[in-house]
Image: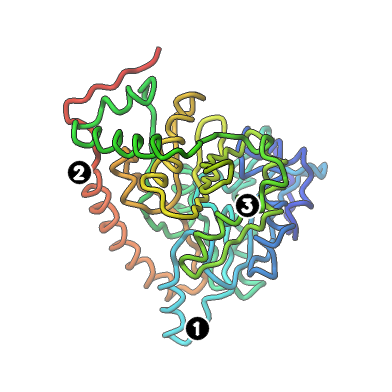
Amino acid sequence: MTTSLSLSSITSAAGIPRPAWERLGPAGDPFLNADFLTILETHGAAAVASGWTPCHLVATDADGRIVGLLPMYGKRHSHGDFIYDWAWAAAWRQLGRAYYPKLMSCVPHTPVGGPRLLVADGASPPAVRRLLLAGAKALVGRLGASSWHVALPTDDEAEWLQGEGLLLSHDVQFHWTDPGWGDFDGYLASFSAAKRRKVRADRRRVAESGLLLETRHGDQVEAAEWPLLHALYASTFERFSNHAAFSANCLADLALALGRRMVVFIARAQRIPVAVAICFRSDEALFGRYWGCSGNHPGLHFELCFHQGIEYCLRHGLRRFEPGAGGEHKLARGFQPTVVRSAHWIADPGMRRLLARHLALQKEAVVDYHDAAADHLPFRRDATVRRED
């Protein structure tokens, strides 16, 4: 039982010892570990120069043992945190107020849900959570921030944070789940005939294109290969006049550190990479993150970003595939609309009341959108699922 706790702020994920990460982070998680955040900070993807100021909150017991952790970043923009609050910043500005800086508890550049208030086994979760919560609110005041946001916490955390006065926002992502399909053919057997023919035609087009597809884990990709793969990844951002947060060296270091927790799907033409989909995995799920392609290759985006990932999950016993934020085109591949939530502490009471009314309306719209999207899934109405023993 934790009887005496203290709180401090750490300015680098590298300042948190690896054994503490191993005690606090979910086992096998590719993001909440001693490597992912440290590498992003070291390579500037989540550092002061790019508008991310690390200020992680750490709770220790009377013996100095780390028993709680709340990843935290001060931010001066809204890129890469996936709470979609640009309109909020505009509202603050219209009222003559400053929205930035704000504080974020999230995995940078990664719209993946998971625990945010990390508590070690043997500690008192309520006491540690309350200390981290109080510390976050106090940090808002010390830094003159407008708000503190917790992106995509667990359902349990979201409910608890709401009970502690934070507001909840709602969004829809598209997730694939495996209740026991067996293999890809078994999965497609649950589709309507027309939808099944469409997927098979897309896959056949890629198979007949002459492209070589391969699946490799991070520790199977040589460092010398990352400049070409990175150029493909960066081209997606350049196409939309956006900035690629990760450098080639950052991806190479992530691959080396994470090993099998990074999964890379590559398409080659005459041994030269022409497309890449960079994913990460836990013990239970695959997470699609970065896609890039050169040239025009019909059907390749669906194949590399979705179909190869589904086959990987089926081969490796992963029950869930989260291919990233947004994308109604995922419906036709069987990715089901899933409501996700984020939590928000707004320092100013008046702005908190205004935002609460907005978020109540947003929740209704999100639920309506979720229900409408579900009507466009490709599954047969009479489909039965083969369940594994």
Earlier along the polypeptide chain: callout 3 or callout 2? 3
Q: How far apart are marks 2 and 1 (CA)?
A: 42 Å
At label 3, counting other C-alpha atoms closer than 10 Å, the crowd grade (few under 14, some 14-19, many 20 or more) is: some
Q: Describe residue 195's horizontal placement relative to residue 153 as left or right.
A: left
Amino acid type for the residue under numbered disc 1: Arg
Residue 154 image point, x, y percent = 49, 44
- The quadrant holding residue 245 is bottom right
Quadrant where the N terminus lies? top right
The amino acid pointed to by label 3 is: Leu
Closer to the chain start, of discs 1 and 3, is 1
| Mark 3 touches mark 2? (CB < 8 Å) | no
The residue shown at (65%, 73%) is 143
In the image, which is nearer the foreground, mark 1 or mark 3? Answer: 3
Q: Which residue lies furthest to the bottom in this view?
A: 96
Residue tagged by mark 3? 228
Residue at disc 3, secondary structure: helix
Label 2 sits on residue:
375
Report how many numbered discs are placed on residues in the image: 3
Q: Residue 180 appears at what percent x and percent y? A: 37, 21
Decide if residue 356 is in sight here.
Answer: yes
